Amino acid sequence: MARMKFICDTERCIECNGCVTACKNENEVPWGVNRRRVVTVNDGIIGQEKSVSVACMHCSDAPCMAVCPVDCFYRTDEGVVLHDKDICIGCGYCSFACPFGAPQFLSKGAFGTRSKMDKCTFCSGGPEANGSVAEFEKYGRNRLAEGKLPLCAEMCSTKALIGGDSDIISGIFNQRVAIREKNGKYPGSKAFGWSTAYGGPDTPAPTPTPAAKIPGAK
Amino acid sequence: MKLHFKTLGLCVAAAALLAACSEPPAIAAKAAKRPDVAPYMGANDGFMTKGWTPGNQASWTESTDKRTQGQNEYSRVK
């Protein structure tokens, strides 16, 4: 059985925000809610500026599912974490539990009222009938049921963001890492590219900045 | 006998009062989790891709796997 995942290759992401736009358009996500966003670090530092496209990672052991007081989440056989908006009470616990900031809430109206939670569905809708109007209005397009993959990944111009069966996409990433290594970039990074992500065996562990050097820290 | 009637009366009153604390069946049914339909069953919305049979899990998996591999330029461009 397929286990659907996303991988974003920071060596390729050019911060075009095409994935964000594609997601909003395909799912008609309301103003103020971004199911996907691009995060950039080391802005302006030549050679060190990296961008990554982030959305729900459809965790195998999802913390949002663990903390939901009304148990509105479920995981499909394809490994996609979805939720039922008819059960969600919009409490926001999931947004505190999620390490990726995936759960989104539409803030409108008086007194800071919030909507029900909205998040990336891996373009696979929700518990309504596949491809129905009700499913589209609540969760967006069900591209998986149409035989397609999430639009953010399919339209990525540099193929930085890839999505699909975890074994296949990790194989694609593995091949890229091997080619980079062959071409002299990140020598010794080995097979899957974990060393690129987390540092190789010879990479010294980062030294924490002493509190005395951080302005305002005690 | 009188005591029995009193106890029975108290039980009926308690049951009547506590009934208000229960969830009406309509609400309970609405809040229940619904099963989702698997994507390999198809969407029937006019936007489905060709090359696989809705309802056939193996053909859906094969089709999406092929599409996933299509994201790899090294296998598309030689």
Image (cartoon, helix red, strand yellow):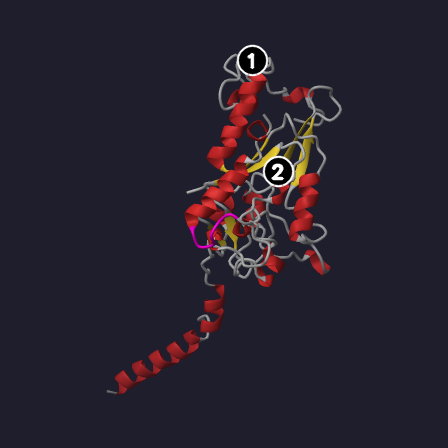
Q: Position of residue A129 (x, y in %)?
A: 52, 61
Q: Nearer the viewer, mark 1 or mark 2?
A: 1
Residue A193 is inside the magenta segment:
no
- Which quadrant of the view contains residue A37? top right
* Chain letter belonging to callout 1: A
- Which of the two residues, A118 or B35, is positioned nearer the viewer here? B35
- Which of the two residues, B32 or A206, is positioned nearer the viewer here? B32
Instruction: Examine the rendered structure and indicate whether residue A197 appears above or below residue B51.
Output: above
Residue at left offset 68%, top offset 48%: A24
Q: Main secondary structure of the magenta part?
A: loop
Residue at left offset 62%, top offset 33%: A159
Instruction: Examine the rendered structure and indicate whether residue B15 appears above or below residue A168.
Output: below
Looking at the rendering, the stretch of residues picked out in magenta corresponds to B51-56
Residue B52 is inside the magenta segment:
yes
Q: Position of residue B34 (x, y in %)?
A: 46, 60
Q: Is residue A171 left or right of residue A28?
A: left
At label 1, which amino acid type do we have? Answer: Pro
* Chain letter belonging to callout 2: A
Labels 1 and 2 positioned on one and the same chain: yes
Label 2 environment density (alpha carbons within 10 Å; few <14, some 14–19, many ≥20): many
Residue at left offset 56%, top offset 44%: A149
Residue with the mark numbered 2: A54
**Farthest-out residue, bottom:** B2
